Amino acid sequence: MARLGVNIDHVATVRQARGTMSPDPVAAAAIAELAGADGITVHLREDRRHIQDRDVELLRRTVQTSLNLEMACTDEIVAIANKLRPDCVTLVPEKRQELTTEGGLNVVGAALSLGRHIESMQENGIVVSLFIDPDLEQIDAAMQLGADAIEIHTGSYCDAPSRGARQAELVKVQTAIHAARQAGIAVNAGHGLNYNNIIPVVALGGIDEFNIGHSIIARAVLVGLERAVREMKELLAG
């Protein structure tokens, strides 16, 4: 059974909307873990639009499962990661104007800067994953850089406008899983997955961990976070 990493960014989004102390993403992480989450994911963005530095510091001390820090590969954020030493970091592309991460990292085009930062974090005992599109060239580049894992960007599959297009994207995901497995790299997946479209991806097999945020937090608004996490866990069980 694949692990479930619950992304709690949007708990912080609600908090930041009013500039108050609640809802507290640290408390949300504890509830998610009690409900069966195998890990907690947060994205410390350069503009600090939701998760703040203090959140990551507190989560590093309180998370009992595994803390995955999504981050841009910049000197500032890498320094924070090396100081706090989360269990895992997932390097993602980041643009200030985007609503959410819009695509995978261009590992091929940024190999020199990525390699330096990957090595520094691995020296601090941090597992490094690269968020990439289901593209064989990017997977090969990730392997060459010594990444511990990849996270397959499932956004194109989730946003496909027709059944045929969705199936074509699913085949790309399946091919990427196989290639990464052959290369000996751990395989995670995430972005845009919800309680309906995740079912065919789970059926592919070969994915170690799903990192899911928006759909779980949106469901939690209606039914509570504990139930929302448990329902997603049930889907991962097949």
Image (cartoon, rainbow, N blue to C red):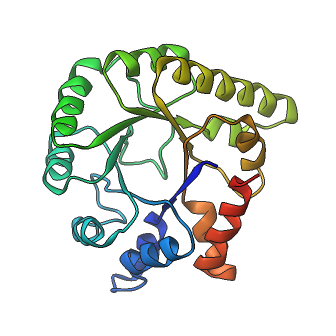
95 or 109, which is in the foreground? 109
Q: Is residue 204 above or below residue 232?
A: above
Position of residue 123 in the picture relative to residue 49 (left or right): left
Position of residue 166 in the picture relative to residue 46 (left or right): right
Q: Is residue 68 above or below residue 160?
A: below
Position of residue 33 in the picture relative to residue 148 (left or right): right
Q: Which residue sits at x=73%, y=35%? A: 204
- Name the spot of residue 218 as percent of width and height, x first: 63, 70
- Name the spot of residue 38 as percent of width and height, x first: 50, 60
- Which residue is most to the right? 163
- Name the spot of residue 131 as percent of width and height, x first: 45, 36
Q: Is residue 67 above or below residue 110?
A: below
Note whether residue 108 is visible.
Answer: no
Q: Which residue sits at x=71%, y=55%? A: 237
Q: Which residue sits at x=78%, y=34%? A: 166
Q: Which residue sits at x=20%, y=39%? A: 121
- Name the spot of residue 223 as percent of width and height, x first: 69, 81
Residue 29 quadrant: bottom left
17 or 157, which is in the foreground? 157
Position of residue 65 in the picture relative to residue 123 (left or right): right
Labels in figure, total:
0
Residue 12 quadrant: bottom left
Note whether residue 20 is visible.
Answer: yes
